[in-house]
Image (cartoon, coloured by chain):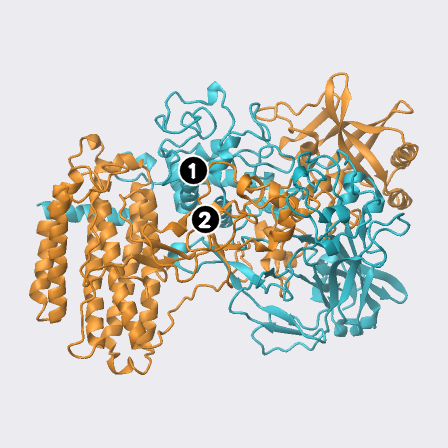
């Protein structure tokens, strides 16, 4: 199916406005997509761009009608009331042979009855109602029931007319009350657009918008996403103030009411939206007439006050050596941070001998495979940490190197502009989705490395003396491995998809252990020792440091693993405490 | 070849209000160009037409999309182009060529640019519709006319109809409804990066909407808290409408549904007397006419709707104005039939992406207040949420038979105030990947048919305020009944479902337990086998 010039407009979705023309789907030069009908919300009550219900007021050629409820002996019923006749058009059609003598006389009779103030009502509607096929609706009897299941009818008169198939025969029986006669108009369901995609000339300027709110802001105040979420959000993430210090948990991921009255951007995010009506805290009627331009545009669910720039596909060289080093040290911290997340997730999975998996070897194997891959990737991230440290060392003057082993407090943003802290969670679906996001090539972790790579490939003057191909290859290798991690998490998502989270997790909400919990404390001690070994090894350099680095690897398998299992077996989440040691304390993004 | 007809493109466009001087640049929906974000929609700047002081056009490619200048929102101001169909005299219309209408094309036909006129009419009929009084409509009395040689910006004045007594809008103080300008036709270069997408010779005009102001009688400039009017509805300088013209203080008719869609004198009585406020939106009709000596004039039409900004420009509706118009066209069955299986896959994935984009901004936890009380036949005996969520016998509650048993839902908590909204975002993001959607079908072939509400269907226990969780749940259609996809969309969805079920039934079974209920991608299958094989080896 053709997409238009690489954009997300599928030909099948584009309004068939210009018939017999392939050009109907093309874009008009200079016009943003928000000018297109594909950007407008179709369900209207009354609507934002237009109220399409006004189309049905001209479903009969040469007639303008209203759908009106009248009181009958059987109760309230809806009828079709002609309010105007385009006699000039009808007479022209008659002269051209397009209308019969009988047809034109009906139009003339209706026109005369309207002119004298007489009641004219369509009381019978026969036609082809789209997917419901041919129906004959006696409007004295029609109540829109049943509107579901076999033998259903349209739920109301407007919907019935809305469903009539364009160009198919329609019969309407009109009652002219003053004369006590009925007339049967046999015609076809009118076309609403002309051959060139404009509204039919039958529609007057202002007719499609006449029932929109007056003023339009009244609708903005009254209606929400049960009509038009795509143009008028209910809930969004608030503007993220520049320079906001990182926090854990990150409070700026909160969903807040978009149309809130209190709009000042402050150091704290607005209160969360709730399951209660937001109306009391929203901009009020009348007030919104003054304040509507204060409403924020929303990109990727987050409010924005600045221009939107597409995500760069390639990295941008950093300005100088200090910036490059800052990014590398942060990158090492990110590797440590995601490794911790993956380990936490791995230990949250049920062990092989969990009794609830008895008789379900597929589930058991899926869990085993997931755990194994989480561990593999976590170890892979540790390898990346080492590679980054090698690059940092190479860029530093002799004796100036300090190992980069501070865990990142916040992970790099992934589109669309989401930044989040390192978060210890069981391997629930949300966590897996986040793992996929952070490992996505060209995003998240890789987005960070792209800038580093670009700096090494196009080094600023103070980096140029150190920018050896070896370091470019090291960073490229990390980026390449990210693709494997990304695909692995996609596969893990598939493996776990058939199961409830409670099927494969030890607990869907395991508590975080407090200091003093014996197994947890033991794990933290082993974790610190691991970092000490890594620090020692990295500080010595690649070859001299091999021994302590190897010790770290061994401790990972022989100490960390059983201790983490022990924490999980106690029903706790496996977490790694923040360390105060300057060498290991959390690092913020540069 | 001679000109046989002319038309304006786009035939219908949306202009959007904004007070800033510069309009929004051209931008388009695109995929985030990253593997993980396949299907994630964003926007990208595109060739934008800058209009010079002499009405000449210069294409530029911005590196960013500015939606506002300071505290003022940039308007969306669409361009319109006049095109022609050319063909030999007497030739069938199907053989005609569609080409931009240019001075050269006119000259080839013995015509001049001055033979082309574009007339512009604008109208705001909101007050008229609610009162039945034509005197309170306003707009152009005479069309604004564009003709080659005059490329000035022409304002569109909103005036009360001639003869209205008293006129709602004072004669000396019309309401600006925007402006229109005919661009200068320039020679088309062939060596520019935009040469294939921007045509400089074509007759082109631009409509720029008004700024988004409100007008009313003097009373509308007053705040009356006792009448739930905490603020003035209009600025003092815009409170010049005549209160005796027939809009202020008038009880409205019942032709507009819902009936409470205007600023009232007393907002405590929202269908009571009108405060007499109007806005500067309108509907603009354009007609291009090409006079031909000795032959009938040719004409083409176009329309612009003036609307609020699209505040979430990277989110697409799953039921757009275009989708609705397509459903009113007789041709949708043929268009559906012409959709190949590959195109169908692409369309279904795109549709679910649009659903996800809509859901992503939707507070479902709040709208669950619109969940219907389910009849016994729609209830499951067990509470899937184990008593943790309120109203389990309402739609989307723990007893709802339509709930997917794989997903328990968390109750509202301080840490998780909107669990339903979060779950819906996660779930619809997954399902916007065709592979996951196929997985859902594999698990339960009947699921999509059961969960997607057929067009215009409404069950006996439902109404405009209470629906089941059939998709889209808790939303309303244009006449306030439960929202549904439209006919052509539903037909494509069900065709895809049938195709997928048949394909899965015919496919090879998957190794392992419960193989008939599970489809893994090649990657997931291969990796799983490799990992399990490695683990088995490690155990030995």
Give a yes or no on whether discs 2 and 1 share a subunit: no
Residue at horizontal 21 percent and vertical 49 percent from the top: A343
Q: Quadrant of residue A145?
A: top right
Q: Which chain is cyan?
A: B
Screen quadrant of the C terminus of chain A: bottom left
Q: Quadrant of residue B285?
A: bottom right
Residue at horizontal 11 percent and vertical 58 percent from the top: A552
- For disc 2, the neighbor class at 10 Å (few under 14, some 14 to 19, many from 20) is many
Which residue matches tag 2?
A270
Answer whether residue B197 is visible to the viewer in this image: no
Residue at horizontal 33 percent and vertical 54 percent from the top: A247
Residue that protrudes farthest toward the top in the picture: A73
Disc 2 + disc 1, Cβ < 8 Å: no
For residue A337, above or below residue A536: above
Which chain hosts label 1? B
Q: Where's residue A378, x and y in %? A: 21, 54
Mark 1 residue element: helix
Mark 2 residue element: loop
Distance in Å between CA atoms under marks 2 and 1: 20 Å
- For disc 1, the neighbor class at 10 Å (few under 14, some 14 to 19, many from 20) is many
Q: Give the side of residue A223 with respect to residue B430, left or right.
A: right
Asked whether B182 or B223 is in front, the reply is B223
Q: Quadrant of residue B204?
A: bottom right
Residue A369, numbered label: none
Residue at horizontal 71 percent and vertical 69 percent from the top: B202
Q: Where's residue B277, x and y in %? A: 73, 46
Chain A is which colour? orange
Q: Give the side of residue A460 with respect to residue B341, left or right.
A: left
Residue B420, numbered label: 1
For residue A474, above or below residue B511: below
Q: Give the side of residue A447 with respect to residue A362, left or right.
A: right
């Amino acid at each position: 199916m053709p997409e238009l010039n690489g954009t997300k407009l599928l030909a099948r979705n584009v309004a068939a406005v210009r018939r017999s023309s392939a050009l109907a789907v093309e874009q008009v030069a200079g016009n943003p997509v928000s000018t297109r009908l594909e950007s407008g919300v179709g369900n209207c009550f009354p609507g934002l761009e237009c109220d399409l219900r006004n189309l049905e007021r001209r479903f009969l050629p040469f007639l303008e009608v209203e759908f009106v409820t009248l009181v009958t002996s059987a109760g309230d019923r809806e009828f079709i009331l002609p309010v105007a006749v385009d006699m000039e058009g009808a007479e022209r059609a008659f002269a051209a042979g397009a209308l019969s003598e009988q047809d034109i006389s009906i139009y003339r009779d209706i026109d005369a009855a309207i002119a004298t103030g007489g009641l004219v009502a369509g009381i019978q509607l026969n036609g082809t109602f789209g997917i419901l096929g041919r129906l004959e609706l006696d409007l004295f009897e029609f109540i829109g029931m049943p509107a579901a299941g076999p033998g259903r009818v349209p739920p109301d008169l407007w919907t019935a007319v809305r469903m009539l198939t364009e160009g198919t025969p329609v019969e309407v029986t009109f009652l002219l009350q003053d004369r006590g006669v009925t007339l049967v108009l046999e015609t076809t369901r009118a076309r609403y657009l002309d051959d060139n995609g404009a509204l039919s000339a039958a529609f007057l300027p202002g007719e499609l918008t006449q029932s929109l709110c007056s003023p339009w802001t009244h609708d903005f105040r009254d209606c929400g996403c049960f009509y038009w979420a795509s143009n008028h959000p209910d809930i969004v993430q608030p503007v993220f103030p520049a320079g906001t210090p990182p926090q854990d948990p990150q409070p700026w991921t909160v969903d807040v009411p978009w149309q809130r009255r209190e709009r000042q951007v402050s150091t704290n995010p607005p209160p969360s939206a709730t399951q209660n009506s937001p109306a009391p805290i929203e901009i009020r009627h009348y007030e919104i007439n003054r304040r509507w331009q204060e409403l924020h545009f929303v990109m990727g669910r987050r409010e924005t006050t600045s221009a939107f720039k597409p995500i760069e596909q390639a990295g941008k060289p950093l300005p100088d050596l200090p910036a490059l080093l800052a990014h590398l040290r942060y990158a090492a911290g990110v590797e440590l941070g995601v490794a911790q997340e993956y380990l936490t997730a791995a230990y949250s999975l049920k062990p092989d001998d969990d009794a609830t998996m008895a008789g379900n070897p597929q589930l058991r194997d899926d869990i085993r495979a997931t755990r194994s891959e989480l561990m593999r990737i976590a170890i892979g991230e540790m390898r990346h940490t080492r590679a980054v440290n090698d690059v940092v060392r190479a860029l530093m003057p002799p004796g100036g190197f300090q190992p980069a082993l501070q865990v990142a407090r916040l992970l790099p943003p992934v589109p669309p502009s989401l930044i989040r802290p390192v978060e210890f969670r069981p391997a629930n679906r949300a966590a897996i989705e986040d793992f996929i996001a952070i490992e996505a090539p060209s995003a998240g972790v890789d987005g960070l490395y792209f800038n580093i790579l670009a700096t090494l490939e196009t080094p600023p003057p103070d980096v140029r003396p150190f920018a050896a191909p070896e370091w470019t290859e090291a960073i490229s290798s990390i980026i390449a491995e990210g693709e494997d991690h990304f695909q692995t998490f996609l596969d893990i998502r598939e493996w776990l998809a058939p199961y409830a989270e409670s099927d494969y997790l030890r607990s869907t909400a395991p508590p975080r252990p407090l200091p003093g919990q014996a197994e947890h404390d033991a794990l933290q001690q082993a974790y610190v020792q691991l970092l000490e070994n890594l620090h020692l090894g990295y500080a010595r350099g690649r070859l001299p440091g091999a021994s302590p680095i190897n010790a770290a690897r061994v401790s990972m398998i022989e100490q960390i693993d059983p201790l983490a299992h022990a924490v999980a077996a106690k029903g706790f989440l496996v977490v790694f405490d923040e360390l105060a040691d300057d060498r290991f304390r959390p690092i913020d993004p540069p | 070849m001679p000109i046989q007809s002319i038309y304006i493109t786009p035939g219908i466009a949306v202009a959007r209000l904004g007070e800033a001087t510069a309009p929004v640049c051209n931008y388009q929906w695109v995929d985030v160009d990253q593997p993980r974000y396949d299907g994630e929609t964003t926007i990208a700047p595109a060739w934008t037409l800058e209009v010079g002081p002499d009405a000449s056009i210069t294409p530029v490619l911005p590196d960013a999309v500015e939606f506002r200048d300071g505290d003022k929102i940039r308007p969306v101001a669409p361009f319109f182009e006049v095109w022609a169909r050319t063909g030999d005299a007497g030739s069938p219309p199907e053989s005609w060529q569609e080409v931009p209408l240019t001075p050269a094309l006119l000259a080839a036909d013995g015509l001049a640019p001055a033979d082309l006129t574009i007339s512009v009419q604008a109208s705001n009929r909101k007050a008229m519709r609610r009162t039945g009084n034509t005197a309170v409509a306003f707009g152009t009395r005479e069309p604004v006319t564009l003709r080659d040689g005059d490329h000035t910006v022409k304002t569109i004045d909103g005036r009360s109809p001639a003869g209205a007594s008293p006129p709602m809008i004072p004669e000396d103080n019309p309401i600006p409804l925007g402006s229109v300008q005919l661009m200068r036709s320039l020679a088309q270069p062939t060596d520019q990066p935009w040469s294939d997408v921007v045509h400089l010779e074509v007759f082109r005009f631009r409509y720029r909407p008004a700024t988004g102001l409100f007008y009313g009688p003097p009373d509308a400039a007053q705040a009356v808290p006792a009448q739930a009017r905490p603020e003035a509805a209009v600025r003092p300088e815009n409170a010049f409408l005549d209160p005796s013209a027939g809009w202020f203080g008038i009880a409205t008719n019942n032709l507009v549904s819902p009936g409470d869609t205007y600023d009232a004198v007393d907002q405590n009585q929202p269908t009571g007397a009108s405060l007499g406020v109007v806005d500067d939106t309108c509907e603009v009709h354009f007609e291009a006419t090409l006079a031909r000596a000795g032959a009938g004039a040719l004409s083409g039409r176009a329309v612009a709707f003036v609307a609020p900004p699209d505040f979430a420009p990277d989110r697409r509706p799953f039921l757009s104005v275009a989708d609705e118009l397509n459903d009113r066209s007789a041709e949708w069955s043929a268009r559906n039939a012409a959709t190949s299986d590959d195109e169908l896959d692409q369309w279904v994935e795109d549709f679910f992406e649009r659903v996800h984009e809509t859901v992503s901004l939707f507070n479902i936890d709040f709208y669950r207040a619109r969940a219907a009380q389910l009849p016994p036949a729609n209830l499951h005996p067990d509470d899937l949420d184990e008593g943790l969520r309120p109203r389990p016998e309402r739609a989307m509650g723990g007893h709802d038979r339509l709930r997917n048993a794989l997903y328990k839902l968390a109750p509202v908590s301080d840490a998780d105030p909107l669990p339903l909204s979060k779950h819906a975002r996660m779930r619809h993001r997954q399902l916007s990947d065709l592979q996951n959607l196929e997985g859902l079908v594999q698990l339960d072939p009947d699921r999509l048919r059961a969960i997607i509400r057929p067009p215009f269907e409404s069950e006996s226990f439902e109404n405009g305020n209470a629906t089941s969780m059939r998709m889209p749940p808790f939303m309303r259609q244009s006449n306030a009944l439960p929202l549904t996809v439209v006919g052509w969309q539903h037909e494509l969805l069900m065709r895809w479902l049938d195709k997928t079920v048949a394909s899965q039934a015919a496919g090879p079974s998957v190794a392992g337990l419960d193989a008939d209920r599970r489809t893994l991608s090649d990657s997931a299958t291969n990796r799983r086998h490799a990992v399990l094989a490695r683990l088995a080896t490690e155990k030995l």
